[in-house]
Amino acid sequence: MIDHDALEKEGFCIVDGVLTRARATEVKEKLWAAAAESERRGSPTFIRGLDPNEANVRVFNLLDLDPVFVDLIQHPTALDAVQTTLGEQFLISNFTANIARPGAKSMVPHSDLAVVFPGPWLHRWSMNVIWCLDDVHEANGATRYLPGSHRLQNQSDLPEDFQHHMQPFETSAGDVIVMEGRLWHTSGENTTTNEDRALLFGYYTAPFLRPQVNWNVLLSDQTKDGLSAQMTQWLGLGAAANIVNAEFVARPAQS
Ligand SMILES: O=C(O)CCC(=O)C(=O)O
């Protein structure tokens, strides 16, 4: 279950064994197939500027690549994490994977809220649900986070030597890391010679924040046609774009 005390205090919590190890392995196989399909479609899995070398395999647009990812983004554990923190209404902002292979280096540290909102970061307006498909530990490139950084309101609040204080998440295959959007983090270096570290990043925001990607453009008609009405709304695929807070609009006094 979601540890709300830890989320409040640390900016993250770990939910053990959401997937069995066997299921995590199956999803990883589908992830590699998705990576190959992404390349085939012309969407590269290495982005210069995002990662220092090709040992990071990035898979974007997961929802269009295999139905298993449509299931995971609306998994009950993910929905519980998101709806008990952001509220009933939210948007799915992105769903991507990063496989850190041996030799992978760290990306630029960031908070995911900073990527979609310039600040000041006054509230917990976004959440990451990170699916661990491998055991994750420091040597194979565990995501590193800056303790307490979910309380920073502006980039200028970051201490100069903050990179020295970052710590790795340690989890097992099948676990989920629920991380709020204000927590500063980066990918770790994979210093092993033979261990991959595959993670899926489901990113959700408060409904007034524009998603990181334009699902209307990214998703094929076939994928869109297979979505439930609820998923269509969570992906912002309907005609209405920004009226979720309509109940707060002042109404004329009743006579
Ligand atoms: O792969 C990781 O550990 C972190 C990835 C990340 O933060 C990102 O892609 O924005």
Image (cartoon, rainbow, N blue to C red):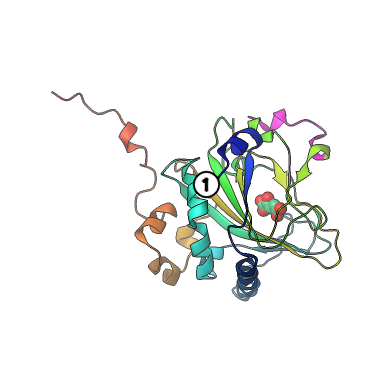
Q: Position of residue 3 (x, y in %)?
A: 58, 41
Q: Nearer the viewer, residue 251 or 227?
A: 227
Q: Is residue 153 magenta?
A: yes
Q: Is residue 210 visible?
A: no
Q: Nearer the viewer, residue 22 or 108?
A: 22
* Residue located 51% across and 49% down the image: 211
Quadrant housing residue 151:
top right
Which residue is identified by label 1? 81
Q: Position of residue 11 (x, y in %)?
A: 63, 38
* Residue located 56% across and 57% down the image: 95
Q: Is mark 1 within 8 Å of ligand 1?
A: no
Up-down relation of residue 58 to residue 118 (above or below): below
How many numbered callouts? 1
Quadrant housing residue 147:
top right
Q: Position of residue 86 (x, y in %)?
A: 48, 40
* Residue located 45% across and 46% down the image: 90
Q: Amino acid at mark 1?
A: Ala
Q: Is residue 216 magenta?
A: no
Q: Position of residue 194 (x, y in %)?
A: 83, 68
Q: Is residue 142 visible?
A: yes
Residue 141 relative to residue 96: left or right: right
Quarter placement of the C terminus: top left
- Near mark 1 (Cα within 10 A), the count class, few <14, some 14-19 or many ≥20, is many
Quadrant housing residue 243:
top left
Q: Secondary structure at mark 1?
A: helix
Check the image and name the residue furthest to the left: 255
Residue 228 relative to residue 116: left or right: left
Give the residues in magenta: 152-163
